[in-house]
Image: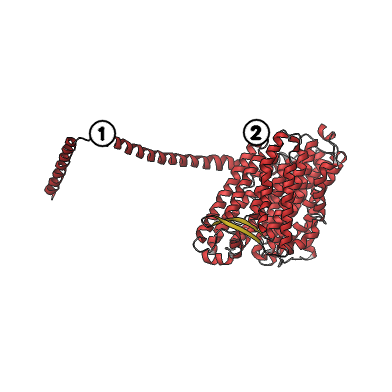
Amino acid sequence: MVGIYFLIFIFPLIAFPAEYIIGKYRLKLSGIFSSIMILLSLILVIDAYLYLLNHNAIYVHYQWFYNIDFGIYIDHLTVLMAMMVSFVSLMINLFAIFYMREDPRKNIYFSETSLFVTAMLGLVISSNLVLLFLFWEIVGLCSYLLIGFWFFKPNAASAAKKAFLVTRVGDLLFIIGMAVLYTSLVKISPVSPLSIPYLITNAHKISILIGKNTLALATLLILAGAIAKSAQFPLHVWIPDAMEGPTTVSALIHAATMVTAGVYLVARVFPLFEYSAAYSLYTVTAIGAFTAFFAGILGIVMNDIKRVLAYSTISQLGYMLASIGLGGIIGYSGVTFGMYHLVVHAIFKALLFMSAAVILIALLELRDIKQMGGLFRRMPVTAILMLIGAITLAAIPPTAGYFSKGQIISASYEYYLNGGSIIPWLLLLFSEILTAVYTFRMYFLVFLGKPRSYLAEHARDPKLVYLTPLMVLAFLSLTLGIIQKPFYKFLYSGVNIYTPPLYIAVIPVIFSFIGIGIAYMIYYYTVNKKIDISRNPLYRIIKNKFYLDIIYTDYVAERIILPLSFYIGHGDRTYDNSIDKMGSDLADAGTGLRKIQTGSAGYYVVFLLIGLSILFIIIELLGMIK
């Protein structure tokens, strides 16, 4: 009976070819069938959730090859993640029917997004790391196809290649991490050594058998894969360029699929991190907290509305990763807090990106927020919806973002009180100011004041029916805080919800309002041209993203990887050619020897006598030497 849950990822897989075929004959119907299939997946996930209320985890698996199995594993973590993926993907897919309505290739778009959702759901419910990695790679392929969907635009084609190449770095390290685990466990594991249920239930035993440092090596390599996928420092550089695809693709990547996969992976194998050497989880915390702060700085200077949201995603993913890392001291509660923020973030980030999509439709894809302005009067419904997303992102009470992000900041303070470093708390706290600044700088420049372009002057809201998915997400952004404690208890019954002193608890809220105030000042001085910071050296460093793209392209790629690949390629070709030459030389020798095989007995007697004579001479010479 539980085998029916394979359909969770099979339903959208059916839509993959079906959408293409339907669109070939009835283009106007594109998107409807895939929405139905994703809805069916969501219904199955909800059914699995209800099943888990009274039963243990669902584990269905079959022998695949050697000692690797093929199957699904659905526990409390899995079902919550799958519910988020299917629900948010459904909302985005429904909105995309409106957003892509004029695109002549929209059937291909919905076909590719169906495969994208298939891969993400398959990744989430996979029963072992090998199968998870296969879906992981399909997610990467789909992101490449969708980021470059408008491939006729040079920037889109370039962005797709960049995303594909950067994430391949992490994928290579991920597969090496799996290899370390496999080779260490293959002789001692009674079952499939990369089975997720085996790894998470026997993590302590594994750490004893293979050693904490070996386990730490494996987990850090797996973490590298997550860092690339979830756009964490220093492999975050692909995600701002990924904004060249359709805005609904940006929503899908940032909210429901690709970037959340990395965080989910670390949460999924958290017991391995927990029982490895302590520096493993310290690294997770450090990278997450630093990325949250670093991306916040970059978001402040962006003028492209989609890039502002892109850096906000990087920053919020940093919060999630840092929260999981806090588990080194506060235990699985850190994972619980991080996953709650992941779900909340998916809701409000999808809302923000789809609100941006509505604006871009009205402004004919104009993305520069400095050329907008005055849209509150012209697009009031969109303005209110985006305001809800903005206050949720900035963690203003009583939005869901206030509960999810506030709990992570409180947990980082608890982490400090229990012997951890105070730096994660400080970085996450000051990231809160930065979040409010870049969010409301964007909002004020887009919606307040007078229109600063002809397109902004004539912008209008679309029909309300097209905004229905956004309204659903806005409602959840405001109300999802009420399920905070039930969410925690469902995911981890032993969760410890730390309540800091009041003066500590209110600091993030105060910082958020300070950030909004700073954002208004920036807006006022920008609109009234009171100050020009474009020549400021610090501004130029931040505007150029700390020159990381230049470092990676001009130094790492061109001066290290390119020459290295040349020498490796040259050595590879030389070796191949030597092997080929050896074969051809042997063939030539065989051809020469074949000439003496005449079939004549007289020839054979002559050669025999010559051979014996040579042998006799050699023997005589050896005798003379002695």
Depth check: give the residue in front, 75 or 450. 75
Q: Quadrant of residue 402?
A: bottom right
**Answer yes or no: do the residues labelled 2 and 1 have beta carbons within 8 Å?**
no
Residue marked by disc 2: 154
Instruction: Say whether residue 363 is left or right of residue 264.
Output: right
Residue marked by disc 1: 595
Name the element at disc 1. Answer: loop
Is residue 248 depicted above or below 490 in this figure? above
Distance between the Cα atoms at labels 2 and 1?
62 Å
Instruction: Say whether residue 606 is left or right of residue 378.
Output: left
The location of residue 197, given as percent across then percent down, is: 61, 61
Instruction: Say whether residue 559 is left or right of residue 11.
Output: left
Going 23% across and 34% down the picture, which residue do you hit?
A: 598
Q: Is residue 369 visible?
A: no
| Quadrant location, the N terminus | bottom right
Going 72% across and 54% down the picture, which residue do you hit?
A: 44
Amino acid type of the residue tagged 2 in the rendering: Pro
Going 83% across and 56% down the picture, which residue do you hit?
A: 398
